[in-house]
Image (cartoon, rainbow, N blue to C red):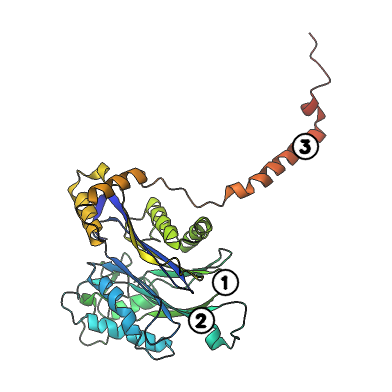
Amino acid sequence: MGAVLCAPVRSQLLSRVGDKRFRVGAAQMQGFRTEMEDAHCICLNLEGHPNVSFFGVYDGHSGDKVSKHLAKHLHNHISHVGPGLEDQALQQAVVEFDLEVGKFSNMRDNGSTCIFALVQPHNEDSGQEESSKEKLWKVTVANVGDSRAMLIRADGKLVSLTTDHKPSVRSEAKRIQTAGGFVQNDRVDGDLAMSRAIGDFKYKKNADLGPLAQKVIALPTISHDVVYPGDRLLVVCDGIVERIDNKEVAKFVHATHKRHEKDPAEVMRLLNLYSLARGSTDNHSAMLVCFDNGVSYDGPDVFMPGPFSAWKEDRSFKTAYIKNAQAWGQSSDNLPSLIAEGDASNPEDWRKVSRVSTNWMAWLPAALLLTLLAMVLYNMDHPSSLWGSNYSDEE
């Protein structure tokens, strides 16, 4: 685990992307970490693949070089896969991309998870007629590491699309040990918290073994599902689920999306804050893909400053806050006004976020009616309690 600050950097960068098919919102937050090492990619039109879209999240570690490299180049690399985007071809493409990363000396010691979803109309290869009233989508997820993807159905039901690649998993542990490593505290050689990653070549240097037999490998697990009207696709880094599980995440997103139906980026901003309040000390990245017309939603990234003044005397916090703001396009000239905005719009205590709840106002009339009915039934059996006793104490 990396170094942590005295307080989280709560500034967020919100991305809003859309076309006639999708409304996509993403939010990033540095949190307690001294550096922001996450990156993501939203590509609505994958080159060479009509009607295929690419959504990726990359959770870097030991630096941000690999995660940024993934965000900039992986979707272009995947675009050269054959027209069918078959599972084996996708796996081979990711492994080849990792080998290319290993050729850059400045990236070999950095690493990153890699999760991406390829989305295309399901009608095209399902035999369903174009005139069908329901628009269905085929989702293919490739996962390396412990970031996650999930579908949240229209009714809130969760469908997890990934399983974490952890060193303690029997098949992963066997490969690690065969390659000369060991698993301690669910970490490769007592250090790396995932058994598959892009980069991390200090775990891939056994010259007698191929790329799929090293202590850490880049082979993605592939999964598929179908999106129905009203469903949403959520892709997150492991910082989101550091202290909460998929079920709680899905419940929060489903409830929050009802209040912000047209702004998935705001839903992700609130999810980041919720995860932070529940105890996560990691970077936060979250992306929500909604399958509706988002032509009017598309716009430039928006920087939302977090509070600063309460911790301005702490050198590490001050350095991290300013560096984060500058990395996301903010100049020194406008920092004072941003800090004032961040201080005014955020509570000092980051733990002050409500737990997941349903919309209690919707249940209020029914609750009052049940209470009234219970009172009536009680007083039918105990009339004296309603009209007063027919007896009085003798003096």
Q: Callout 2: few (<14), some (14-19), or many (20+) C-alpha neighbours within 10 Å?
A: some
- Residue type at mark 2 is Pro
Tell me what residue is drawn at x 38 percent, y 89 percent: 89
Pick the residue in front: 51 or 367. 51
Where does the N terminus fall, quadrant-wise? bottom left
- The label shown at residue 376 is 3
Q: Callout 1: few (<14), some (14-19), or many (20+) C-alpha neighbours within 10 Å?
A: some
Pick the residue in front: 207 or 282. 282
Position of 44 relative to 395 (above/below): below
- The label shown at residue 121 is 2
- Residue type at mark 1 is Pro
- Could you tell me which secondary element the residue under label 2 belongs to? strand
The answer, for residue 34, to whether it is visible in the render is: no
- Residue type at mark 3 is Val
* Residue 387 left/right relative to 274: right
Tell me what residue is drawn at x 35 percent, y 84 percent: 78
Quarter assignment of residue 106: bottom left
Sequence order check: which comes first, mark 2 or mark 3? 2
Q: Which residue in the structure is indicated by mark 1?
A: 229
Quarter assignment of residue 229: bottom right
* Residue 160 left/right relative to 323: right
The answer, for residue 13, to whether it is visible in the render is: yes
- Could you tell me which secondary element the residue under label 1 belongs to? loop
Estimate the spatial distance between the alpha carbons at disc 2 and disc 3, rounded to whole Å.
Answer: 56 Å
Where does the C terminus fall, quadrant-wise? top right
User: Closer to us: mark 3 or mark 1?
Assistant: 1
Sequence order check: which comes first, mark 3 or mark 1? 1
- Where is residue 67 shown, x and y percent of the image? 28, 71
- Where is residue 302 shown, x and y percent of the image? 34, 59
